């Protein structure tokens, strides 16, 4: 298993009194995995597994970070539109 570490100022903990060092570490892990999902580097299932969540709970977590569960890239939308048009055209030809 890969271990990632980073340093931050000691006064960060004082700036967020509702957090402990452990909760900040968990938050950093969560944010990293959500970001990797948003970039397409991991699946929702992989993100869920690494956080010890159900896939549904991971998908709900994405909303907290304003990350869509759908791939909304222009290219993906264009490809999907082409597929849907081709399927519709083939239905009318029969």
Image (cartoon, grey):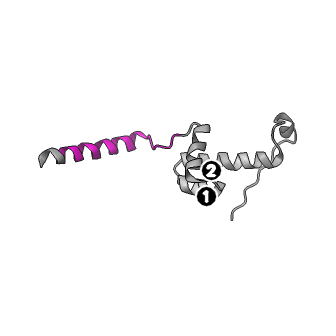
Q: Position of residue 37 (x, y in %)?
A: 56, 49
Q: Which residue is mark 2?
A: 33
Judged by its main secondary structure, the magenta piece is helix
Task: Give left or right: position of 85 versus 41.
Answer: left
Mark earlier in primary sequence (2, 1): 2
In the rendered structure, does residue 83 fall within the stretch colored magenta? yes
Q: CA distance from mark 2 to mark 1?
A: 10 Å
Label 1 crowding class (10 Å Cα cut-off): few <14, some 14-19, many 20+? Answer: few
Secondary structure under the numbered disc 1 in the rendered image: helix
Label 2 crowding class (10 Å Cα cut-off): few <14, some 14-19, many 20+? Answer: many
- Relative to 12, residue 49 above or below: below
- Relative to 53, residue 38 above or below: above
Q: Which residue is mark 1?
A: 49
Span colored in magenta: 68-90
| Residue drawn at point x = 87 percent, y = 36 percent | 14
Between disc 2 and disc 1, the foreground one is 1
Q: Position of residue 77 (x, y in %)?
A: 37, 41
Residue 65 appears anywhere in the view: no
The quadrant of the rendering that contains the N terminus is bottom right
Task: Give left or right: position of 49 versus 11.
Answer: left
Of residue 65 and residue 61, the one placed in the foreground of this image is 61
């Amino acid at each position: 298993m890969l271990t990632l570490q980073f340093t931050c100022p000691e006064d960060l903990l004082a700036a967020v009194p509702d957090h402990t060092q452990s909760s900040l570490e968990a938050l950093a892990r969560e944010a990293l995995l959500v970001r990797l999902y948003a970039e397409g580097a991991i699946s929702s299932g992989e993100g869920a597994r690494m956080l010890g969540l159900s896939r549904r709970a991971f998908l709900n977590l994405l909303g907290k970070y304003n990350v869509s569960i759908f791939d909304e890239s222009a290219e993906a939308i264009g490809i999907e539109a082409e597929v849907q048009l081709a399927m519709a055209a083939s239905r009318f030809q029969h």
